Each structure stands twice: as structure tokens, then as C-alpha cells.
Image (cartoon, helix red, strand yellow):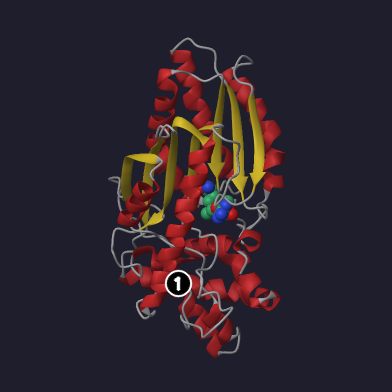
Amino acid sequence: MEVMTVLHMNKGTGETSYAKNSTLQSKIISVAKPFVEEAILEVLCSNIPESLGIADLGCSSGPNTLSVISEVIDIVHAKCVNMRRLSPEIRVYLNDLPGNDFNNIFMSLPEFHKKLKVDKGAGFGPCFVSGMPGSFYGRLFPRKSLHFVHSSSSLHWLSQVPSGLDGKAGPTLNKGKLYISKTSPECVARAYADQFKRDFVLYLESRSAEMVTGGRMVLSLMGRISNDPSAESAFLWELLSLVLMAMASKGLVEETKVDSFNAPYYAPSTEELKSEITREGSFTIDYLETFEASWDYFGCGEEYVPFSGERVAKMVRAVVESMLESHFGGGILVVMDELFRRYAEMVDDHLSKNRAKNILVVVSLTRREAPQSL
Ligand SMILES: C[S@@+](CC[C@H](N)C(=O)[O-])C[C@H]1O[C@@H](n2cnc3c(N)ncnc32)[C@H](O)[C@@H]1O
């Protein structure tokens, strides 16, 4: 599977679109908000730059995309008013893979600019918003052009299916499973961890070149407290593999296709994140915190409300449908509704017996001063 060309959230604004099924991701954005605020204020504290560069990486399309940017702009505006300073010009770069529904974002920009003018006054800005299609696992922006980088619910997607698990050569190593499972051979977990490390270091190196010294970056992604990679959020993949295998036994999908599908996803442990950030060396860790994230509960003192299988199924469908279609072929479209109906039932059953644990990691980083070259 070529992740770069295949992966995209469900487009448009229909029933199965990402725009309609991204409330979990929206909650994740709110959980990270205090970290974003702290980071932006820190960027502006010593010296407000004439031109402020902000990037949202893995922005997708839908209500979350411009909500993050609006939040950042509100913080900048409030700070400038507070300091009785003119606001800087703001360059906003919205990045995602080329298959993302950028058209949908661009269509909403006139309304966004109009609201900005009404809320902040004609003297604010100007604010230049542009799209940057491409993979964040590599350079996207000119050197030292960014002061703040944000990425939410995106960095758990790998650049590719881990080598050796892509079914291109040799035997299928992870039969009947889509991700690391309790029954997966050890080499599967190793291949996933190695791929994550390679990708994450490349991500850090690329941002290191693009960010100014003292620039800040806030990343929120699915991760792990447990050392066991088949624990916590892995249950979503485990249940999807059980549904696909049940459908394969009825001849509704090809079993060999289930055997050869491995999701380009990895939820790293906090230790893995810290160790790669330290090893790469361009950033200091200001904060690294974990939250238990489910539909209606983030471990922030709210009451625990179990989420419904139907809602989980809609969220998972909006995210993985493009990959399923690419891997299984167009034939799977005929049984897609059935697949996610069964998945919703299975999630309901699972959640009636277990408390789901999705661990969200929020990490806030500062770009270190580069060592003086000789
Ligand atoms: C679950 S969505 C999150 C979107 C948005 N940030 C939010 O919080 O709602 C993950 C996004 O990351 C994007 N993505 C995954 N891998 C990427 C990569 N290598 N480069 C750029 N975007 C990527 C996907 O295309 C998808 O739009």
C-alpha cells in the first residue's frame, strides 16, 4: 500500500465523511489547547516577529482544520492587544497528504477571512492561509520559516506499512491480523517499532530545519502507557480483524487479503517518544503528558460515559475506508456497510465487558539553538 497516495480521510460532508465523524479528534484538540496557548505565548514573549509562520501538519478537512488555526490566531490577537502592539502578519500553512480534501478547506476560506475581519478588526493581520500537500516525513517548508508547528491525531500514521509486513515478498507474517496483536510473532512488533523510529526521527529532522531557534511545536497522537504494543488503543484494530476474518469465513472478503493487510499505524510508548526526541537532539521537551481518551471522557475529572459502538464504527470508517478500498479492491464497497454494522456490534459487546483505553500523548517541544559550526 502506498500510504502517500492511498491514505485520506473520507471526503466531503456526507454521513460517512471525516468532517461529520471527527468529534474524538476535536476533543483531542481541546485537550491540547492549554499546551498550544503556553507555546504560542512563549514564542511571542521575547519578541513578536514581523511575520509569524504557523503550520498545522495532517490538517485533514472539516470543522477541526480551521478551528485549530482560529484558536492560534485568537491567542496571538489577545497577546498583541494586551501588549498594545500591532499584530504580526501571519502565514498559516495547512499540510496534509495530496489526497486530502483541500478543496473543501479552500471553499471555507472566504468565510474564515470575513469572520477574522469582523472579530479582530481590519487592523489585524494580514493572515495568509495556504495549503501544502505532501508528507510531513520530509521537508515541506523553507529553512527557518516556522515559529509554531502543530499536529493533532496524525503522527501515529506511519509513512508506510513496516518493511517485511507489506506482503510484497516472503510469507505473510501477521495472518488474520491488521496490527500488532497478542498472537502476532515478535518480529511484527519489532518491525512496527523500527518503522515508527525511522519515521519520527525524519519528522523531527525536517522540522528542525524549518523552525526558527526557540520555535515551538505541540504534537498530540495516540500512544501507550503500557510497554505492550498490543494493549490499549490496539483493540480497535483487533476487533476490525475479527470482523474481517468472520466475513472471510462467509466468503464476503478474501482471507488472503486480510492476512496481507497491516495498518500503517503505530501508537508509541512515552518512552519511545522521549528516547527518539533525545536521540535526534534538535528539540527539548517542555511537557509530555498522557490522557486517557475515549469518546466522552478524557480523564479530566469528567464522568465516564461509555461510547457507543455505532459512533466508534463511524469514526473508524471515516479514517480507514480509503485504505480498505485500496487493499481489498472496489469489491469491498458492496460489503462496507455490513462490515461496519458488524464492527459496531462487536465494539458494543467489547465495551460492555471492558473499559476501553485510548491513550493520548501530548508533547510540547522547543527548537534548540543549533550548535555553532566550526
Ligand atoms: C485523523 S486525521 C486528523 C486531522 C486533524 N488534525 C484533526 O485533528 O481532526 C489524520 C490526518 O493526518 C494525515 N496524514 C497522515 N500521514 C501523513 C503524512 N505523512 N503527511 C501529512 N499528513 C498525513 C491524514 O491524511 C489525515 O488527514
Vertical relation: 69 (above or below) 173: above
Q: Which residue sits at x=61%, y=20%?
A: 125
Quadrant housing the C terminus: top left
Label 1 Cα neighbours within 10 Å, binned few <14 / some 14-19 / many ≥20: many
Q: Is residue 204 left or right of residue 6?
A: left
Q: Which residue sits at x=58%, y=81%?
A: 257
Vertical relation: 104 (above or below) 261: above
Image location (x, y in percent) of residue 63? 58, 43
Residue type, mark 1 in image: Tyr
The image quadrant that residue 29 belongs to is top left
212 or 222: which is nearer to us? 212
Image location (x, y in percent) of residue 111? 68, 32
Image location (x, y in percent) of residue 28? 43, 47
Image location (x, y in percent) of residue 264? 52, 65
Q: Is residue 305 left or right of residue 206?
A: left
Q: Which residue sits at x=39%, y=40%?
A: 283
Quadrant housing the N terminus: bottom right
Pick out the residue farthest to the top.
84
109 or 128: which is nearer to us? 128
The image quadrant that residue 215 belongs to is top left
Residue 173 visible somewhere in the drawing: yes
Q: How many marks?
A: 1
Label 1 sits on residue: 179
The image quadrant that residue 341 belongs to is bottom right
Q: Which element carries disc 1, helix, strand or loop?
A: loop
